[in-house]
């Protein structure tokens, strides 16, 4: 395996030759040191799951996409390399309520809106969720941030400070929502709109990608040192208000959408006129690295453009909100759980995203239907919650915080999140069993540290099925020799099996059920 550690590259294969290359498209000063991007080269051993012939495992999972999935051994090697380079998870369980999609306030705070959000905060606490992604950017002060001058300081407003203080008193951390290069507010949407040299210049021809260029979307060019220094300073000033986490959304155009690649024709920025992709990516990395350095205890969450750019755009990021790519609607929690696990596998085995950086999404419904209590997916909550917990230590929740859900459901969410916190060290590691989620099969994942850990098994079908796994390091990550005891923790059961290292264990999983097994060395007689 070989490549460059950069999202936008022009590498290609010519016959038997692999050409690694990228286009910096940067302006540099005489005598300036320019550090090139790293290239990687590695070898990996083929594994027993590379030769599976039943199609759905590693082929054509994305609708309309005819590319084959990488070999399982290749994806395992890539993820291991990325994990080593990035340093592994920095936080424990990070369940996040997404305020934008959870009936949180979206505009500047009034006393009335603050009171409503404080009630929503209580709702999240009752669900056991202790990370809050608010529904508004810049603490609701988008207009004021847009109006800041070159030297003006950004100070979070008093009502926002009250919300942060109340959250911290409840043991919860709040994300400062930042926008990348526009403000999502007002007729221009730009920061410092009087600074004409900061504007991304589309030129006469629209840049490629979606959405198509519209002059009203034109924001600031991130690959422009004066603007970059300004936006870094403003973010640092905002984080000084005791936010415990930081996130941003947007794209390099100055809009909220799917567009990633961007051409800026300005000759006044740090890039050459035209292709400004690499320069923008480089600036975004510096922004994240600065936040990471100045506020080392801050959890960094990326929306767009990171979820489109791929893993090499996430080196300074803790988690990446990645959505369910095959649609938001989930009719019921078993189908929802299967989607959570399926797309998490795609992100690992195709995009090489370490699982601890993933952020599975639970309970999404179309925006037009979100506030109808009848649309809350009832039943099998354990199935979807265990699907998410087995996928990643971080999850995103769309919850009707004002409409409400049954008290029993809040209690069950709280129960499983507390269970996740108790077992977080196991959830930080993951090794998938061969079968992918599908009716008629038992899929799952192993979370083993040394000689003990957890195994999740899922059966979404209408009949009981037997799942199996080998007690080996290659199969589930188990180390050690001798005998092991396997017990069923969820649903509670007295069933227990003793098996020797190297043997294959079989376990019956009831229909539409998630089973959690605990494995540890057997006590010597």
Image (tube, rainbow, N blue to C red):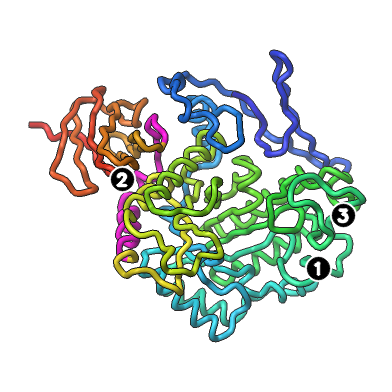
Q: Is residue 58 left or right of residue 472?
A: right
Q: Is residue 126 left or right of residue 494?
A: right
Q: Is residue 502 above or below residue 269?
A: above
Q: Secondary structure at mark 2?
A: loop
Q: Which residue is mark 2?
A: 512
Assess whether mark 3 and mark 2 are in contact (beta carbons under 8 angstroms). Answer: no
Q: Secondary structure at mark 1?
A: loop
Q: Which residue is mark 1?
A: 188
Q: Secondary structure at mark 3?
A: loop
Q: Is residue 497 above or below residue 149?
A: above
Q: Nearer the viewer, mark 1 or mark 2?
A: 2
Q: Nearer the viewer, mark 2 or mark 3?
A: 2
Q: Residue at x 61, y 47 (%)?
A: 307
Residue 414 spot, x, y in % from top left: 33, 62
Does 337 appear in magenta?
no
Q: Can residue 318 be seen from the camera position used here?
A: no
Q: State the residue in front, 511 or 33.
A: 511
Q: Residue at x 65, y 43 (%)?
A: 309
Q: Is residue 129 above or below residue 451?
A: below
Does 427 appear in magenta?
yes
Q: Quadrant of the N terminus?
A: top right
Range covered by the magenta-colored residues: 411-436
Q: Which mark is residue 201?
A: 3
């Amino acid at each position: 395996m070989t490549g460059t550690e950069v999202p936008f590259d022009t590498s290609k294969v010519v016959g038997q030759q692999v050409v690694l290359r990228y286009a910096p498209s940067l302006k540099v000063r005489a005598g300036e040191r320019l550090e090139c991007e790293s290239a990687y080269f590695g070898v990996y051993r083929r594994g027993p799951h590379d030769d599976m012939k039943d199609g759905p495992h590693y082929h054509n999972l994305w609708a309309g996409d005819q590319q084959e999935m990488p070999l399982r051994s290749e994806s395992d090697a890539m993820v291991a390399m990325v994990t080593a380079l990035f340093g592994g998870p920095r936080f424990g369980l990070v369940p996040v309520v997404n305020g934008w999609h959870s009936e949180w306030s979206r505009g500047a705070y009034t006393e009335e809106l603050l009171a409503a959000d404080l009630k929503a905060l209580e709702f999240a606490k009752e669900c056991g969720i202790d990370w809050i992604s608010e529904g508004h950017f810049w603490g609701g002060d988008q207009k004021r941030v847009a109006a800041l001058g070159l030297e003006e300081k950004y100070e979070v407003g008093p009502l926002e400070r009250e919300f942060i203080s109340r959250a911290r008193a409840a043991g919860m951390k709040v994300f400062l929502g930042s926008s990348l290069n526009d403000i999502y507010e007002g007729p221009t949407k730009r920061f410092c709109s009087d600074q004409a040299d900061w504007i991304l210049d589309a030129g006469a021809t629209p840049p490629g990608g979606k959405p198509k260029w519209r002059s009203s979307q034109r924001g600031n060019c991130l690959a422009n040192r004066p603007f970059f220094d300004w936006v870094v300073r403003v973010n640092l000033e905002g984080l000084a208000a005791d936010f415990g986490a930081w996130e941003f959304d947007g794209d390099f155009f100055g809009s909220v959408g799917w567009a990633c690649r961007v051409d800026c024709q300005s000759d006044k920025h740090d890039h050459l006129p035209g292709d400004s992709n690499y320069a923008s990516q480089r600036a975004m990395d510096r922004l994240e690295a600065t936040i990471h350095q100045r506020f080392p205890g801050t959890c960094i969450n990326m929306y767009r453009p990171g979820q489109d750019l791929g893993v090499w755009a996430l080196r300074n990021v803790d988690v990446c909100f990645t959505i369910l790519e095959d649609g938001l609607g989930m009719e019921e929690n078993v189908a929802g759980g299967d989607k959570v696990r399926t797309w998490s596998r795609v992100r690992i085995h195709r995009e090489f995203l370490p699982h601890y950086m993933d952020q599975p999404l639970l309970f999404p419904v179309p925006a037009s239907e979100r506030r109808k209590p009848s649309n809350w997916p009832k039943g099998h909550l354990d199935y979807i919650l265990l699907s998410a917990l087995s996928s990643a230590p971080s999850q995103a929740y769309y919850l009707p915080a004002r409409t409400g859900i049954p008290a029993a459901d809040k209690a069950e969410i709280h129960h499983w999140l507390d269970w996740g916190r108790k077992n977080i060290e196991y959830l930080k590691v993951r090794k998938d069993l061969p079968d992918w989620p599908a009716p008629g099969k038992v899929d799952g994942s192993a979370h083993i540290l040394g000689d003990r850990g957890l195994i999740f098994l899922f059966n979404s079908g209408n009949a009981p099925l037997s799942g199996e796994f080998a007690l080996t390091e290659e199969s589930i990550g188990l180390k050690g020799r001798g005998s092991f005891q396997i017990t069923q923790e969820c649903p509670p059961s007295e069933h227990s099996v003793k098996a020797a290292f190297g043997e294959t264990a079989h376990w019956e999983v009831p229909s539409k059920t998630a089973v959690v097994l605990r494995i540890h060395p057997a006590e010597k007689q």
